[in-house]
């Protein structure tokens, strides 16, 4: 019996039984029901015309003299004396024989009800949802089992060469576990992949399985957490039983922090369902035999919240860091994701990689996809460099706001503000030179000045102070030209203040405070928070030092713009005319040379499509803890 006919039979039988029950109930429901006392009063008042009584029963029906029907129930079976008395009063009395009971229906009804119950149990136990799970199999693991090895290999992974080197040992073990067992070597049971979101942790785990040509069992940490007590632990047991049947294999648990968080935070000592699931996971990790050929890999971007018992030797005893790729890794990732996309001859992926520091693999893939969408919308057959540059800006700052209408006053303020930033970048010795200046609104910004920045690991004090001066260049230009200030420097102040405070409290770059860490930053891949380790008096001194540092850099950039006032006016006029200046055009304007006719010098309405690549935050780089 296939599924469709069984469903139809199930619905049909249920409908017949319901209809039959309603029909029996309908037949037994009296109409015109009156009380027995009312019936006797009607007889005394000669209002009853005829009476029908069932033999040996208590149910009485009949008609009034006005032909209205009624029914009633006597307290006891009607006697012959009562019937004769009613006939003597001139009432038509009729006695009906008792109804015949159907023994077949009395026998069939219990069988039908029992059969219906068994049919319902059979139906729900065999019925499967979209995931293929039985309705009663919620304790089964929801992991996806790829019995055939993934086609992804290390050739499809770029930007993490160190991680691939560490994982090659796992691949060799899965390919030939006997060689390691003969030497008595113990390969790590668990490998924890740690890195920021989008860095390719899942991708490299699939590549390990593809290189080793072993089954790949994947699950998410949230798959084990349920509201029912014991379900998560049962799913963990089922997951490892499934892995043992497919050994050698790889178990991959994504976002393991959903189930592996540090214990002890729940009510009543933390004995909640999530902690029971974690306990079962720890037991299963210890339960592997020495010669087991199962490797469990997990990924997280929050290693700081994991339970210490999960990270001890014998469990997840190896951590592989997958950080944001460097410039060479970004170029390799771009080349991988560019496969299958028609690229124009002017596309330079190496240049694009240099202009996108801080991008992870997901960002680069999204950028190429945005470029392909832009090219398709414009009706082009190939992706051009212009599409890639616009896509980079779109990923970071959002699309250009072509519909935003700015007054001439707003455009002038924005132009002077961005020109102040750009000139500070150009003239300050340790600042990054400008790559692009624009007053085209994007996202929440009315304009921006983007520096040309390479990957930097060590930031010197001179470089940081110049970055603060660059951040304050926009406000300084407003003060110099308009002798007034606006709200446009809000984000600049935030970044400059944060950078100055970190120089004093974390990096020991102030003579009055020395090499002391007054503040410890607890960094995670999703952000960071500061742990204060100083007194109120020290806090007051730090605030004064931050203010002094900012005022010093503000005065430095103000003096610079006073000396370069003529250049400031030239750059502002060029921005008001062309809206966007790339590095070469900005250089010509600063030197007083005329701009050559170029695609980037078109009317302002089309200029927002000419913006070069990615916007790097002006003063809030990834400084790490160096």
Image (cartoon, grey):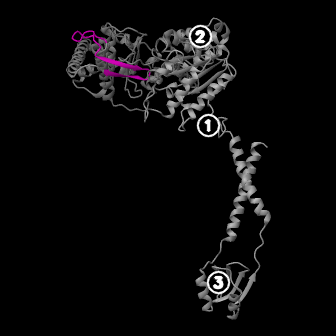
Local crowd size for mark 2, using a 10 Å CA cut-off: few (<14), some (14–19), many (≥20): few
Q: CA distance from mark 3 to mark 1?
A: 61 Å
Provide the residue designation for mark 1. Answer: 138
The tally of labels here is 3
Contact check, label 3 and label 1, Cβ < 8 Å: no
User: Of the residues under marks 3 and 1, which one precedes in the sequence?
Assistant: 3
Between the C-alphas of marks 2 and 1, the distance is: 35 Å
Q: Nearer the viewer, mark 3 or mark 2?
A: 2
* Pair 3/1: label in front: 1
Hey, which residue is sitting farthest top in the picture?
A: 183
C-alpha distance separating marks 3 and 2: 96 Å
Q: Secondary structure at mark 1?
A: loop
Q: Which residues are magenta?
A: 507-531
Residue 527 within the segment the image draws in magenta:
yes
Give percent across and percent down for residue 452.
Answer: 41, 12
Q: Secondary structure at mark 3?
A: loop
Badge 2 marks a residue whose secondary structure is loop
In the picture provided, is 243 more to the left or to the right than 256? right
Q: Is residue 54 left or right of residue 277?
A: right
Which residue position is annotated with label 2? Answer: 186
* Mark toward the start of the polypeptide (2 vs 1): 1
Residue linked to disc 3: 68
């Amino acid at each position: 019996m296939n599924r469709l006919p069984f469903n139809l039979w199930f619905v049909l039988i249920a409908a017949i039984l319901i209809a039959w029950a309603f029909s029996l109930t309908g037949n037994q429901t009296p109409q015109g029901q009156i009380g027995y006392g009312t019936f006797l009063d009607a007889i005394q008042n000669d209002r009853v015309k005829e009476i029908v009584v069932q033999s040996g029963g208590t149910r009485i029906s009949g008609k009034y003299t006005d032909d209205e029907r009624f029914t009633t129930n006597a307290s006891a079976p009607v006697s012959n004396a009562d019937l004769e008395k009613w006939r003597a009063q001139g009432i038509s009395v009729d006695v009906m024989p008792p109804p015949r009971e159907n023994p077949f229906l009395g026998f069939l009804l219990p069988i039908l009800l029992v059969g219906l119950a068994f049919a319902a149990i059979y139906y729900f136990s065999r019925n499967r949802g979209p995931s293929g799970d039985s309705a009663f199999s919620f304790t089964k693991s929801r992991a996806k089992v790829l019995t055939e090895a993934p086609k992804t290999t290390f050739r499809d992974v770029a930007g993490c060469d160190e991680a691939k080197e560490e994982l090659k040992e796992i691949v060799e073990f899965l390919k030939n576990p006997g060689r390691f067992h003969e030497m008595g070597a113990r390969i790590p049971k668990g490998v924890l992949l740690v890195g920021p979101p989008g860095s390719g942790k899942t991708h490299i785990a699939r590549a390990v399985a593809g290189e080793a040509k072993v089954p790949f069992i994947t699950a998410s940490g949230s798959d084990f957490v349920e509201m029912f007590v014991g379900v998560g632990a049962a799913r963990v047991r089922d997951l490892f039983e499934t892995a043992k049947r497919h050994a050698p294999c790889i178990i991959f648990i994504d976002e393991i922090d959903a189930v592996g968080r540090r214990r002890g935070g729940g009510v009543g000592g933390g004995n909640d369902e999530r902690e029971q699931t974690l306990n079962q996971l720890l037991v299963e990790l210890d339960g592997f035999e020495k010669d087991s050929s199962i490797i469990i890999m997990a990924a997280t971007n929050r290693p700081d919240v994991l339970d210490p018992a999960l990270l001890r030797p014998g469990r997840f005893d190896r951590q592989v860091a997958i950080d944001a790729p460097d410039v060479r890794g970004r170029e390799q990732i771009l080349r991988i994701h560019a496969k299958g996309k028609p690229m124009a001859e002017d596309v330079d992926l190496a240049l694009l990689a240099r202009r996108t520091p801080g991008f992870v693999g997901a960002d680069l893939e999204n950028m190429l996809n945005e470029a392909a969408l832009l090219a398709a919308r414009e009706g082009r057959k190939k992706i051009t460099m212009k599409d890639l540059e616009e896509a980079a800006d779109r990923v970071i700052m959002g699309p250009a706001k072509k519909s935003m209408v700015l007054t001439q006053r707003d455009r002038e303020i924005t132009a002077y503000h961005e020109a102040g930033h750009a000139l500070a970048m150009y003239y300050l010795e340790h600042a990054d030179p400008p790559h692009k200046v624009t007053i085209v609104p994007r996202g929440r910004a009315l304009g921006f000045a983007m520096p040309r920045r390479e990957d930097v690991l060590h930031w010197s004090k001179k470089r940081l102070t110049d970055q603060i001066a660059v951040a304050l260049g926009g406000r300084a230009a407003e003060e110099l030209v308009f002798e007034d200030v606006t709200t446009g420097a809000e984000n600049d102040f935030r970044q400059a203040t944060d950078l100055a405070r970190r120089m004093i409290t974390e990096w020991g770059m102030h003579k009055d405070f020395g090499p002391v860490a007054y503040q410890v930053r607890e960094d995670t891949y999703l952000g960071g928070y500061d742990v204060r380790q100083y007194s109120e008096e020290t806090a007051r001194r730090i605030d004064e030092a931050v203010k002094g540092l900012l005022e010093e850099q503000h005065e430095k950039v103000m003096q610079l713009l006073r000396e370069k006032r003529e250049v400031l006016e030239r750059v502002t006029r060029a921005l008001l005319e062309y809206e966007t200046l790339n590095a070469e055009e900005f250089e010509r304007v600063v030197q007083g040379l005329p701009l050559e006719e170029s695609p980037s010098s078109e009317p302002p309405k089309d200029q927002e499509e000419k913006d070069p690549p990615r916007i790097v935050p002006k003063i809030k780089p990834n400084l790490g803890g160096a």
